[in-house]
Amino acid sequence: MTQRSILRRIRGVNTSDGAGVKLKRIIGQPGLDMLDPFLLLDEFRSDQAGDYIAGFPEHPHRGFETVTYMLAGHMKHHDNHGNSGDLVPGSVQWMTAGRGILHSEMPEQEDGLMWGFQLWVNLPARDKMIAPRYQDIGPERIPLVRPSQGVEVKVIAGEFGGVTGPVAEIVTQPIYLDIAVQPGARIEIPLPEGHAGFAYVFDGTDAEVAGDVLARSELAVLSPAGSLGIAGRDSAARVLLVAGRPLKESVTRYGPFVMNTPEQIHEAIADFRAGKF
């Protein structure tokens, strides 16, 4: 069986977004502008309330999808279409912004650890103006697979170990796995041929990924064919493994708008200013 390898290694850069939330930007920074179809990957993690308390007040999106995966803490989301809900530890929100939405994510806590990821996934040209929708998924809906001794896999999207994740009907056919490995434990993850993918070590000191040591807070851009081997080393580790079908289309972005041409960006700005979202 063909094995995937590491093409590039990327470390995140410290930045802030929203109303000053401190985070680490891994995809969507000078070292890795995008990994088609993935436009952005942020990790937010702090137990200092001043780093996150101002949250992400109402802001627009058009032309792509946002994926929030909470590991610790509690946020509340709300939009201008009347949707609202809670993001609790272990929950996932897959929001398809489509033609436009005004959305906020605000902390529901005043202290303690806030930890999670936000991923932006591009939409193809034909779907950029579809109606917005949410997939709000509580932790109880995410299946946990134990394929071998010392390995646990949360299947958020795609299929692994005979189970299918709860995220459905996403055009890029994503795989989104949270993989926990104990020292010395090993797992082989099959991935669809041609899917662009990355692995990111977010807990523990390091992990073995594709036969190489990947340190904590380091992202590996994976080769496009074959399965991926992951193993624990001297300490337990968790690895975020994400893959998706590349769109291979032109990308023009301006802040929270991701379209195919500059003209479409101008239209998005005009529609937002005219209150058409």
Image: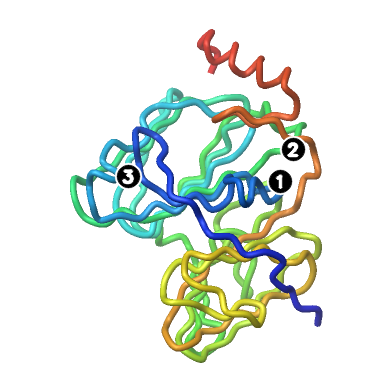
Residue lying furthest top: 274
Identify the colour scheme used.
rainbow
What SS does tag 1 mark? loop
Height in image: 214 above or below 126?
below
Q: Quadrant of residue 61?
A: top right
- Residue 216: percent from left, percent from top: 47, 70
Q: Earlier in the sequence, mark 1 or mark 3?
A: 3
Does 212 sit left or right of 86 as displayed? Answer: right
Which one is nearer the viewer's eye here, 177 or 206?
Answer: 206
Q: Position of residue 138 (x, y in %)?
A: 41, 54
Q: Which residue is mark 1?
A: 171
Q: Real-space Cα distance between discs 2 and 3?
A: 29 Å
Q: From the viewer's perspective, is residue 182 above or below residue 162? A: below
Residue 131 locus on image (x, y percent): 61, 28
Evaluate if marks 1 and 2 touch, with contact meaning CB atoms under 8 Å apart: yes
Q: Earlier in the sequence, mark 2 or mark 3?
A: 3
Q: Please tell me in which quadrant of the rendered image residue 148 appears.
A: bottom right
Q: Which residue is mark 2?
A: 124
Q: Measure the alpha-carbon separation of dots 1 and 2.
A: 8 Å
Instruction: State how many labels appear.
Output: 3
Cα distance in 3D space between marks 1 and 3: 27 Å
Provide the residue designation for mark 3: 75
